[in-house]
Image (spheres, rainbow, N blue to C red):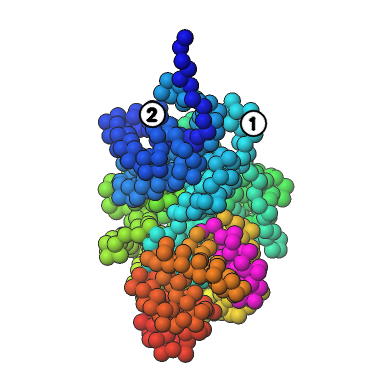
C-alpha cells in the first residue's frame, strides 16, 4: 500500500512575472538572459528574509509560498523597492520591471509542487498588477490592511479566468507611487524623493512640493494621464461660462489605428504639435493640452467635451503607421449641429509628416475663417531626421507619464535624438525638462543636474531664440535651480511674448508674482491660465494658492474643491483642501480631508496639523514623528511648518536651515503659510527672507 504524500494547508501564494521579457528575447536574446539571471538573483536574496519558499520558476516568473499574507506582502514591497532602486541607475534598455500577485487560500503539497485554489487565483491576479506594482485579493487585503504600512486601492471589478467566485482585488499603493484609478497603467506620478529641493514647474498636470507651492508643478498632473484602456465614465464636467466663441477649437488626442497599437506616442505627438501650432493664432482660442488630453479614453461625448472646454469646434482624427507609410485622417466638427466642417485623409510617407501637420493646421484656420496676422502660425523648429523626431516624440510621451523609470527613459530618448541631430532645439528643451523633473522628484546631484540642465537650456536658446519652450526651460533653471526670481520672471514673460497662450508659462508667471507679493497680478495670470485649461485641476489649485494669500478663504476653498473634483487621486489635492479648512477653523472637516490624501508625505504633514488643531496631541506627535523619520531629506519645510504652528521656534528655525540647504521648494512661498506668522517677530525670520531674496 502506498502512503499518501499529500499535505493540505493554508498558505499565502505569490506569483511574479518579468514584464516585457518575451519581447526583449526576440530583440536581444543575450541581454534578455542576462537581465533574467540578475532578476532571479535579486529576488532569491529577498524571499528568505520573509520566510518565503521558492516552489518553482515558471519561465521568467516565480511561484513562492509564505506562511502568512503579511510576510508575502512585505516581501513583495521589498522586491519592488529593490527594483526601483536598481532601476534608478540603470539605462532604459536595462530596466527590470516585475508584476506581483498575491492570494491566500488552501493549497495542496504533492510531489514537490503546490496545487489548489490558492495557487490558481494568485496566478490569475498577477497579470492585473501594473509594471512595478502589486495586486492582492480581498482575503489578503483583509488580513494585512491594519498591519502593513501601506495604503490600498480597490480595483475595478474584473472577472478572473476560470474562477467562478466573484472577488474584489486591491492594489498596494507603494510609497513612491500615488493612488490611481486605473490599475492597468503605471502610476502617473511618483512621490518625490528629492522633490522639495527646487521650486519645480512640471510640464503636464503635477504636484507641488512645498506648502502652497503647488502651482509650480501643475502640468505634471495629467499627469493624471488618461488611460486609453479604461471605459469608466468621466467625473462630472464643469460647464464653460457663456456661449462658445465660434473661433474656438479643441484638438482631441488622435487615435492610434496601427495594427500593433504601438504608435500611441506618435498619435499623441501629432495632436500636441497641432495644438502648439494653432495656439499661436491670435483670433483662435485653443484649450491647452492638459484639458484636451483629460478626456482621453473616457466615455464622454464630443458635445460634453466641447461644453466643458467652452469650444464650438472639435478636431479629431486617427493615425495608422506601418513602416515608412502613414495614413492620417482628420475631421473638424461643429459641435452644435454635428456638422463635419472639413475632413481629409492623408496617405503619405513618414518624411511628409511635417507637411501634413502644416496642411491640417492651415485647413482648420481656413475653415474657421480666421484671419492670420503676419508671423502667426510660424513653422516650428523641426528636424530633417525622422528617426530623431520619432525618438523625441517617444521621449515626450514617456515624460508625461511621470514615473522615475519613464523620466529616465525620456532622458535617454532625448539624448539619442540629439546624437542624430544636435541642432534640434525642441529635443534640447525636452532633455532639460526631463532632467529637472527627474531630479526634483527622484533625487540626484544638484551640481550635476544644474550643469546639464543649464547647458541644455542655453543650447536650445542658441539654436532657436524664438522657441518659447527654450525660454521656459531657462526660466526653470533660473527659478527652480538658482532661485534668481527676477531673472526667471523675465524669462517667463518672454515666453508669453512669444506664445501668449502658453498655459504653463502663465502658471509660472503667476507663481513668481505670488513670490514677489504681486497678488493681483498673480490672480489675473492664473485666471488667464484657467480660461485656457478649463479642466486642468492644477489651475484651480493655483487659484486657491493666490486666494489664500489674498485672505479670500471661501474662494480658496471653492478652488481646492474644484481641483479635487477634477482629480481626486492626485497627490496633494486633499491636503490643500484640508489646509484651507484649518485656516477657516473647520478642524474636523480638515481632518477628514487630510485622511483622504493619497500622498503619504502630504498626508502625515496634514494629519500633524489637523490633529494638533483638534487637541489630539498624541496623534499629532505620531504623525510628526512619521514625517521626520521618512521625509527629513525631502520635506524639511513641512516639518518646520508644524513646529512653527506649535510655537517651538528654535526647532522650526533648525528645520528651516535644513530646508534651505536642501533647496526646499516650500521656502520661496513661506509667507503663504499661516503657521509661519508665529515666526515673524523673530529676527531670524527676516534674515531668512533676505537669504531667499524675498520681499520683507
**Residue on which disc 2 sits:** 57
Task: Please provide percent x and percent y for residue 174.
Answer: 47, 51
Task: Please provide percent x and percent y for residue 576.
Answer: 57, 67
Residue under the point 70% across and 45% down = 338
| Mark 2 neighbour density, 10 Å: few (under 14) some (14–19) many (20 or more) | some
Residue under the point 29% across and 31% down = 33
Span highlighted in magenta in the image: 573-599
| Foreground pick, 479 / 96 | 96
Residue under the point 53% across and 47% down = 144
SS at badge 1:
loop
> Where 481 falls versus 94 (above or below)?
below
Q: Is residue 595 visible?
A: yes
**Residue on which disc 1 sits:** 165
Task: Please provide percent x and percent y for residue 591.
Answer: 61, 67
The secondary structure that most of the magenta stretch takes on is helix
- Determine whether label 2 and label 1 are within 8 Å by CB: no
Name the mark on residue 78. none
| Foreground pick, 360 / 85 | 85
Furthest-front residue in view? 1
> Where 564 falls versus 152 (above or below)?
below
Residue 468 on the magenta segment: no
Looking at the rendered image, the quarter that the C terminus falls into is: bottom left
Task: Please provide percent x and percent y for residue 186.
Answer: 48, 46
| Foreground pick, 126 / 50 | 50
Q: Toward which corner of the image does residue 492 lie, by quadrant?
A: bottom left
Residue 581 on the magenta segment: yes
Sequence order check: which comes first, mark 2 or mark 1? 2
| Mark 1 neighbour density, 10 Å: few (under 14) some (14–19) many (20 or more) | few
| Foreground pick, 206 / 186 | 186
SS at badge 2:
strand
> Where 453 falls versus 23 (above or below)?
below
Amino acid at each position: 500500500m502506498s502512503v499518501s504524500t499529500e499535505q493540505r494547508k493554508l498558505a499565502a501564494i505569490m506569483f511574479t512575472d518579468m514584464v516585457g521579457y518575451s519581447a526583449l528575447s526576440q530583440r536581444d536574446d543575450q541581454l534578455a538572459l542576462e537581465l533574467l539571471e540578475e532578476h532571479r538573483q535579486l529576488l532569491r536574496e529577498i524571499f528568505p528574509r520573509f520566510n518565503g519558499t521558492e516552489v518553482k520558476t515558471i519561465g521568467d516568473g516565480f511561484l513562492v509560498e509564505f506562511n502568512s499574507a503579511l510576510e508575502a506582502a512585505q516581501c513583495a514591497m521589498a522586491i519592488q523597492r529593490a527594483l526601483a532602486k536598481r532601476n534608478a541607475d540603470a539605462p532604459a534598455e536595462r530596466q527590470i520591471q516585475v508584476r506581483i500577485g498575491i492570494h491566500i487560500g488552501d493549497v495542496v503539497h504533492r510531489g514537490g509542487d503546490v496545487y489548489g485554489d490558492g495557487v490558481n487565483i494568485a496566478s490569475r491576479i498577477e497579470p492585473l498588477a501594473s509594471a512595478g506594482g502589486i495586486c492582492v485579493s480581498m482575503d489578503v487585503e483583509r488580513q494585512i490592511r491594519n498591519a502593513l504600512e501601506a495604503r490600498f486601492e480597490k480595483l475595478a471589478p474584473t472577472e478572473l479566468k476560470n474562477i467562478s467566485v466573484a472577488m474584489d482585488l486591491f492594489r498596494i499603493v507603494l510609497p513612491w507611487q500615488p493612488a490611481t484609478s486605473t490599475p492597468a497603467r503605471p502610476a502617473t506620478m511618483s512621490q518625490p524623493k528629492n522633490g522639495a529641493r527646487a521650486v519645480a514647474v512640471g510640464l503636464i498636470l503635477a504636484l507641488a512640493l512645498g506648502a502652497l507651492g503647488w502651482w509650480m508643478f501643475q502640468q505634471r498632473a495629467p499627469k493624471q494621464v488618461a488611460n486609453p484602456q479604461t471605459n469608466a465614465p468621466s467625473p462630472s464636467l464643469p460647464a464653460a461660462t457663456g456661449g462658445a466663441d465660434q473661433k474656438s477649437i479643441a484638438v482631441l488626442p488622435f487615435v492610434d489605428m496601427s495594427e500593433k497599437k504601438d504608435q500611441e506616442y506618435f498619435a499623441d505627438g501629432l495632436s500636441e504639435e497641432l495644438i502648439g501650432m494653432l495656439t499661436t493664432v491670435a483670433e483662435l482660442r485653443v484649450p491647452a493640452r492638459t484639458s484636451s488630453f483629460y478626456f482621453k479614453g473616457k466615455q464622454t461625448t464630443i458635445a460634453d467635451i466641447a461644453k466643458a472646454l467652452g469650444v464650438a469646434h472639435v478636431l479629431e482624427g486617427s493615425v495608422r503607421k506601418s513602416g515608412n507609410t502613414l495614413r492620417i485622417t482628420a475631421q473638424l466638427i461643429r459641435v452644435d449641429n454635428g456638422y463635419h466642417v472639413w475632413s481629409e485623409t492623408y496617405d503619405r510617407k513618414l518624411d511628409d509628416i511635417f507637411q501634413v501637420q502644416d496642411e491640417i493646421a492651415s485647413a482648420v484656420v481656413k475653415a474657421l475663417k480666421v484671419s492670420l496676422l503676419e508671423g502667426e502660425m510660424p513653422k516650428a523648429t523641426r528636424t530633417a531626421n525622422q528617426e530623431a523626431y520619432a525618438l523625441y516624440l517617444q521621449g515626450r510621451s514617456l515624460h508625461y507619464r511621470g514615473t522615475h523609470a519613464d523620466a529616465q527613459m525620456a532622458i535617454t530618448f532625448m539624448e539619442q535624438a540629439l546624437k542624430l541631430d544636435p541642432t534640434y532645439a525642441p529635443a534640447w528643451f525636452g532633455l532639460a525638462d526631463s532632467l529637472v523633473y527627474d531630479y526634483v522628484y527622484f533625487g540626484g546631484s544638484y551640481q550635476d543636474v544644474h550643469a546639464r540642465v543649464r547647458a541644455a537650456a542655453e543650447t536650445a536658446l542658441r539654436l532657436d531664440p524664438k522657441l518659447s519652450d527654450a525660454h521656459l526651460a531657462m526660466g526653470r533653471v533660473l527659478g527652480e535651480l538658482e532661485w534668481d526670481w527676477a531673472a526667471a520672471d523675465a524669462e517667463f514673460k518672454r515666453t508669453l511674448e512669444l506664445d501668449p497662450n502658453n498655459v504653463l508659462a502663465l502658471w509660472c508667471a503667476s507663481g513668481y508674482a505670488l513670490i514677489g507679493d504681486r497678488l493681483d497680478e498673480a490672480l489675473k495670470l492664473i485666471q488667464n491660465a484657467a480660461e485656457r485649461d478649463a479642466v486642468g485641476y492644477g489651475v484651480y489649485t493655483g487659484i486657491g494658492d493666490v486666494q489664500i494669500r489674498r485672505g479670500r478663504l471661501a474662494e480658496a476653498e471653492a478652488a481646492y474643491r474644484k481641483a479635487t473634483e477634477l482629480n481626486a487621486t492626485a497627490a496633494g489635492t486633499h491636503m490643500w483642501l484640508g489646509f484651507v479648512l484649518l485656516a477657516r477653523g473647520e478642524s474636523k472637516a480638515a481632518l477628514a480631508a487630510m485622511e483622504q490624501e493619497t500622498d503619504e508625505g502630504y498626508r502625515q504633514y496634514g494629519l500633524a496639523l489637523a490633529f494638533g488643531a483638534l487637541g489630539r496631541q498624541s496623534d499629532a506627535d505620531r504623525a510628526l514623528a512619521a514625517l521626520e523619520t521618512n521625509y527629513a531629506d525631502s520635506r524639511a519645510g513641512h516639518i518646520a511648518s508644524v513646529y512653527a504652528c506649535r510655537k517651538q521656534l528654535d526647532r522650526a528655525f533648525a528645520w528651516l536651515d535644513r530646508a534651505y540647504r536642501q533647496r526646499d521648494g516650500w521656502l520661496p512661498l513661506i509667507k503663504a503659510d499661516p503657521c509661519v506668522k508665529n515666526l515673524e517677530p523673530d529676527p531670524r525670520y527676516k534674515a531668512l527672507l533676505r537669504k531667499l531674496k524675498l520681499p520683507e
